[in-house]
Image (cartoon, helix red, strand yellow):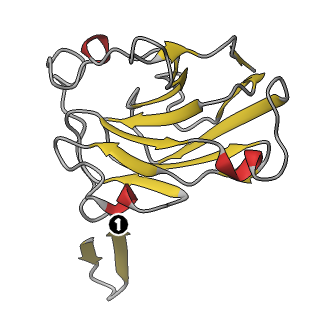
Amino acid sequence: MLRVEARSSNAATARIAIYVRAGAAVRPPELDTNPRSAWSTFGLTHPFGPDPKAANSAVTVRGSYEKDLLVTLVVRGADTLRVTANGRPLTFECDTDPDDLVGGAPCGDVEVVRATEYGAPAQVFDSLYILTSQGLRAGDPVTITVTPSGFSGDDWRLDIFDWTDARGAYATAGTWTRK
């Protein structure tokens, strides 16, 4: 907080307080060109991301459930993401986090993914168990919504794929469209 006081000759006092979020990470200008953090070098299968001019607007995609479907969030910038599938919160587990952006916290089951810094993308995943345990079957419609908060740019992706591809590689999962 910065506090400025001004006094006039008639003993009146004006006070101005400016609050800055403590510890807020500053987005590095080389984020899009650095090979460790550029989206072009990460190899996403079926990515959806924010509009860079509206980084905190929700992104909704629709598709059909398939067996072995995996939903991942990939984050390379600081702040918070919440994700729902058919209105239910998803819980994520840690996959990769080379620069410790998410601080190891999502290596358990978490509904809110928080990244504290900028760097090489961190990846967390969910298998939609919350829906399959309640009767979701192959072919049933799924709507996934990502709600970001506090981002200053194009710093996260939602990726949807089938993790049981016969070659051992991730495969694109069906047809998913942005709402």
Label 1 neighbour load within 10 Å: few <14, some 14-19, many 20+: few
Which residue is denoted by mark 1 in the rendering?
A: 19
Q: Quadrant of the N terminus?
A: bottom left
Q: Count all numbered tags in the image, as a single digit.
A: 1
Residue depicted at x 69% and y 35%:
144
Vertical placement of residue 25 versus 49, above or below: below
Q: Is residue 97 left or right of residue 60?
A: left
What residue occupies the far bottom of the structure in this picture? 11
Residue depicted at x 16% and y 22%:
30
Q: Is residue 4 left or right of residue 150?
A: left
Dot 1: element: loop
Disc 1 marks a residue whose amino acid type is Tyr
Q: Is residue 156 left or right of residue 2?
A: right
Residue depicted at x 37% and y 84%:
12
Residue depicted at x 60% and y 31%:
68
Task: Residue 158: give x, y in percent of width and height.
Answer: 52, 29
Relative to the observer, which residue lies in front, 103 or 13?
103
Relative to the observer, which residue lies in front, 52 or 90?
90
Task: Residue 62: give x, y in percent of width and height.
Answer: 75, 24
Vertical placement of residue 85 versus 92, above or below: above
Q: Quadrant of the C terminus?
A: top right
What residue occupies the far front of the structure in this picture? 166
Task: Residue 88: give x, y in percent of width and height.
Answer: 74, 52
